[in-house]
Image (cartoon, coloured by chain):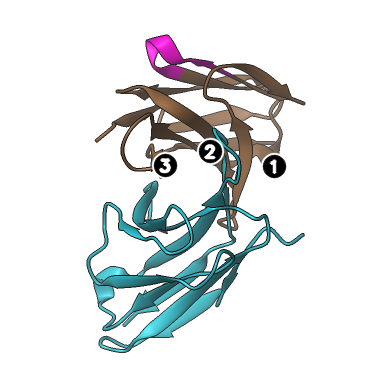
Amino acid sequence: NAGVTQTPKFQVLKTGQSMTLQCAQDMNHNSMYWYRQDPGMGLRLIYYSASEGTTDKGEVPNGYNVSRLNKREFSLRLESAAPSQTSVYFCASSGPGQGVYEQFFGPGTRLTVL
Amino acid sequence: GIQVEQSPPDLILQEGANSTLRCNFSDSVNNLQWFHQNPWGQLINLFYIPSGTKQNGRLSATTVATERYSLLYISSSQTTDSGVYFCAVRQDTGRRALTFGSGTRLQVQP
């Protein structure tokens, strides 16, 4: 039982390049989330998926797209990376039961955009 | 949206000391979690505590939902307790994700 896994752990991009961050969970959770953490701050929500087949914008969605590939996997795509997207990205999941909202986080992806 | 305020922002302790961290939130919540972010950046779940009191070893937490605050107690602190402690809440209505406070940075000195 690996929990929430993310790849890659580290990535350096040049401005304008694209990339996809991968996230998978093996806890049979319905909901999955992408957050970003900037230095000295708490996490902010980028996108979330309440269940397979649905996605919704969070607090800071501009410049990102997401895909809920199946119940296990939720990917985050940067189409044209910008230096302002330099951050640590965390994926999380929660569920599956009614009224169970505890979220579990992956180890994070540290992204630098030059 | 909901506001989450944590205090103090920074805390320096000697090993063995006790501390209390506070989290205030501005609206009703159905989820409140405390996390420890270690120096390697990992987020470790400490408590899932939308209401009531829980204890886990040297750590305990209390949430008084009607008064919109939660407290995290650390007793007999150790150097491995160093890092940032985040409180995060989920509102009763609207978006299902967590809103994080800005954290309390704890440094435990030997």
Rounded to the nearest whole Å, what is the CA distance between mark 1 and mark 3?
A: 26 Å
Task: Look at the picture and state if A69 lies above or below A55.
Answer: below
User: In the picture, which chain is brown?
Assistant: B
Neighbourhood count class around disc 3 (C-alpha, 10 Å): few under 14, some 14–19, many 20 upward? many
Residue in front for this viewpoint, B15 or A10: A10
**Residue A43 on image: x %, y %:** 40, 50
Q: Amino acid at mark 2?
A: Tyr
- Between discs 1 and 3, the one toward the N terminus: 1
Task: Look at the picture and state if A65 lies above or below B84.
Answer: below
Q: Which residue is the site of mark 3?
A: B98
Q: Which residue is the site of mark 2?
A: A101
Query: Regarding mark 1 in the picture, which secondary structure is present there?
Result: helix
Residue B88 visible at all: yes
Neighbourhood count class around disc 1 (C-alpha, 10 Å): few under 14, some 14–19, many 20 upward? few
**Residue A88 on image: x %, y %:** 44, 64
What range is drawn magenta here? B62-69
Q: Which residue is the site of mark 1?
A: B80
Query: Regarding mark 2 in the picture, which secondary structure is present there?
Result: loop
